[in-house]
Amino acid sequence: MNKYKISDEKLNRIIKYLVIILLALGILLISIQFSDFWNWILAAIRAVIIPIGLAYIFALILFPLIRYLEKKGIGPRGFSLGLVFIIAVGLIFAAFYFITPLIISEIQSFFENDFPGIIDYITTDLRDDFIFGTNIYDQIRDYIVETDILNETLQTFVPNLITSISSWVIPLITSIALLPILLLYYLYDYELIGDYIRGIIPKKHEKNVSKLSSRLNDTVGAYLRGQLMLMVALGAIATIVYKLIGLKYYFAFGLLAGITNIIPYFGLIIAALPPIIYSVIATSGPGPLMVLMVNFVLQFIEGNIFQPLIMSHQLSIHPILIIISILFFGSLFGAIGVIFASPIAASIRVFYHFYRDLRKEKLQKSVSEAKGS
């Protein structure tokens, strides 16, 4: 009988765990009942996190330049900050000034020259080129006509698309409008903000927090600067190669390859679809096989040349973790979450490795103390 008897200490522990579980279930039930309230809170948190997160990310990219100028004796902070800020704004303005007319020209040319031919191809020639045969094409067309599924889909899809776009476009515009102000204050008081944050931390954890923040800033900052260079290099290479093979709208397709490369593993696949589809429909220019081979070469160059050279400081994160972070943070923050999923994943990895190193240090310290005693 005695061996089945539960001690008071174990009984108290069981009761404590049961109470915690019941409280957690109660909080979960209350949260479900007030889901609209929590969605409102989440939207408010998102509205704050996005501009602050953007300012933090751009500060990690720009602050090393300010620190470099100060080391060279170009100061004080206000002067070096103004110089870096003017250069950054000038580069952005120059990019828009020279790139925007080219993009607008190619878009106008597309809708004036190629779009009518694409519509004609879909309505006429696509039947003969349909991969599954003309009979299947006729059955699909008859089904679409009889059920009117296309109009019904558009009637539901377009309003939902507008709603979803407005839900993240407005916060994005607000964040972009606030970004220069936040960034100026952040860069000017970069060390002061770091000291203030560390001042909130209890003294016994202040040293570890300082090490963690330094490691986090160095790692994520190197990743972001490398990713920015990678986007520019890959976009330029794609534009040149598309031009050499005679692909029309090479500038728009090359720019798309550079921009979408911010999304790891999926970026170049997304960027390859428009030129491949266009090469299938277009009557002139390279064939789809040529465009597919070019994009395969671009993928090879990006993965085996640019990544090792430019992204030498990038964290080696497993692709599965990147995909999970894209899905998770994309569902939380929309397009912004997809774009910055990799830096967030890199930050989480830094936290994990720092915690692991901290545990090792404590273990080694306890072992050395045990040997000393």
Image (cartoon, rainbow, N blue to C red):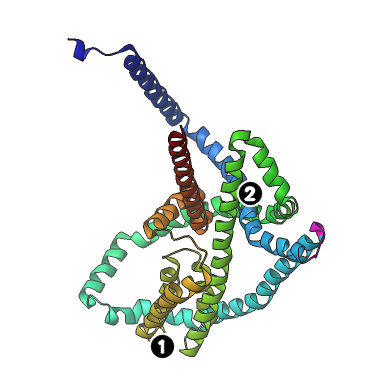
Q: Quick one: SS at disc 2?
A: helix
User: Could you give the CA–CA distance between mark 1 and mark 2, rounded to whole angstroms?
Assistant: 45 Å
Report the front residue among 57 and 146. 57
Mark identifier at residue 136: none
Report the front residue among 140 and 130. 130
Q: Mark 2: which amino acid?
A: Ile
Labels 1 & 2 near each other (Cβ < 8 A): no
Q: Quick one: SS at disc 1?
A: loop
| Residue depicted at 30% across the width and 13% down the height | 7
Residue 75 at x, y = what percent?
Answer: 81, 62
Neighbour tally class for label 2: few under 14, some 14-19, many 20 plus, Cα within 10 Å: some
Residue wearing tag 2: 52
Tell me which segment is drawn in magenta: 73-78
Dot 1 or dot 2: first in sequence order is 2
Q: Is residue 132 left or right of residue 194?
A: left
Mark identifier at residue 286: 1
Res 366 quadrant in image: top left
